[in-house]
Image (tube, grey):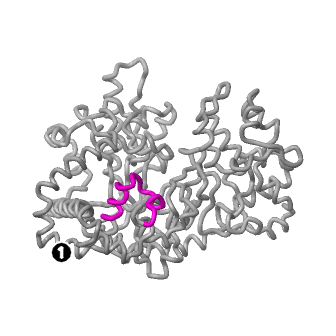
Amino acid sequence: EALAADEDVLTRKHRLLRRVYQTSGKRVLESAEFGSFLEEHAHWLKPYGLFCVLRDLYGNSDSSQWGDLGRLSHAQIDSLASAGGSKYQACCYWYWLQFHLHLQLLDASEYAGNKGIALMGDLPIGINRHAVDVWVRPDLFDLHKMAGAPPDVFTQRGQNWKLPVYDWDRMARDGYSWWRARLKHMGRYFSALRVDHILGFFRLWELPSHAVTGLAGHYSPSSPILASQLDALGLWDRQRLSTRYIRAHLLQRRFGKDSNIVAKRFLEEGPNGAFVFRAGLDTEMALADAIEREPLVLEGMDPQQVLEAVLDMCNDRCLVRDEDAPDERFYPRFRLWETDSFAELGPDWQVKLRQLHDDHFSWRHEELCEATARQRLSVLQGASTMMLVGEDMGPAPSCLPLVLQDASIPGLRIPRVTKMATASYPYLSVAASSTHDMLSSAGWWASLSAAERNQHWTLLGQTGAPPDHDATHTHTHTHNVSTAVTSTFVRQLMACPSMLAMIPLQDLLDTCDSTASRNPTQDQINFPGEQEKSWRWRCALDIEDIVNNAEFVATLRELIHSSDRAVI
């Protein structure tokens, strides 16, 4: 049940695939079926093939490191990647691979359809800044900004996805052709599409390119606070409010007796007894790079804790200046009342700033968010016949339910997030027991207090005391409790009014003793903000073992039929 090592797996797969390509690739490339595929998909396949060749040639996907080959016109890309071009033979492996992936996915989709099963694809909210799309169409992205998410209950410092943000105005000028092409292609294989972070089509948390955490961001689109508005409120000292608030007594509180070491390493004296960051160390990225190069260990703090404390200090301010108009436009720092800068203001300014913050993150942009979402989502819906499903978790504008309802887009309902009775879920929704960003139901249940378990047990419509983990019980008892709890969750979600019920594999397996996880706290797939731990989960059972497990198959069949979700 060891974690998968992604890079090692991919390396091994490509080694085997290239052996297959050497054996049968020439025959496939000369076939009429492949010729038709290449001709139909040349607009994306040739740039993709050349990108992969250059990435492997230079040892990285950052096209700025490829010299002149990193700045090619569309005509030059086509020339290099077409028959007779200097990179054509190397590109053919990638054409061949995509051809087989296309055939296999199409075959799986058609097979599932013949069995009455519809496949749902996934549309990520962003793409890697070193992806082929950015290389070919950099005009569609703002590479000076990154997308992320503000702080929430899962991430104290927010999230920095390190993804470039879209230039929506540029995309609009050609009718959103990039989006339309993506959805049209996905519609070949899927009947429905999960729209990742659909909130991003209303507004997206935007960060500067030198950010590390998600603290220094603001929503886009949004209306900034103007300097004239601050003046009208009597908040005249914009320098004080937008500068990192670092004082000697605050340094001592953060770092104890080692505060002088931190000050000497990163700071210099500024005006009025304040400290400012040294030149070249005044961004999150510069600070993180400096600590990575030369880790700083202080008494009672490891290097990671030191980094977090330094980054918190870097974000200790009430207002964030707009990078494009730093003297005129400002945004409230998310949860500004948690900063020392706010704490050491007078009560009058605190009240005014708190009101600005609350207005900014509540009603101030509602009309703009609604108009933006209606336009963008209509583009997605018009690009294919796939049903869209919105992953709508996170801080949302109040217009979200109305916009999704008007567009007939169901949102997610997850018991641990909604804290609503499953029987009250609306029809236009997708009920799910967990997601890839969460612990499995059994792992989550094990983390709850007795009071929290009672609350969630009641919301599931259950009476009496819930099954409970007890440290004095045996492993077998705990295992049986996990199975009982997960079975109840899954059964209630299957029976709820939501139009679809979506149950992750981990939770389905945990409904049976013979397939349940022996360590459910290790069954989370993605860890927001922790890339090293993410996407390494591997199912402990082979697919053949699952299919041939009579208990599991019978349980799954009974769950489907008893909930009236069986395919007629």
Tell me which segment is drawn in magenta. Answer: 49-68
Give left or right: position of 501 versus 241: left
Helix, strand or loop under label 1: helix
The image position of residue 107, as x and y in percent, is 16, 62
**Label 1 packing within 10 angstroms: few (<14), some (14-19), many (20+):** few
Q: Does residue 116 appear in this view?
A: no
Q: Residue furthest top?
A: 472
Q: Is residue 75 above or below residue 359?
A: below
Could you tell me the amino acid type at mark 1? Ser
Q: Residue at x 74, y 57 (%)?
A: 319
State the residue in front, 381 or 507. 381
In terms of image quadrants, where is residue 505? top left
Give left or right: position of 194 versus 173: left
State the residue in front, 121 or 59. 59
Q: Is residue 59 found inside the magenta-colored segment of the image?
A: yes
The image position of residue 517, as x and y in percent, is 30, 33
Q: Residue at x 41, y 43 (%)?
A: 534
Residue at numbered disc 1? 36
State the residue in front, 512 or 540. 540
Q: Is residue 455 above or below residue 414?
A: above
The image position of residue 2, as x and y in percent, is 32, 33
The quarter in which the N terminus is drawn is top left
Give left or right: position of 135 versus 269: left
Q: Residue at x 64, y 62 (%)?
A: 362
- Specify the principal SS of the magenta part: helix
Q: Is residue 248 above or below residue 374?
A: above
Q: Does residue 514 appear in this view?
A: yes
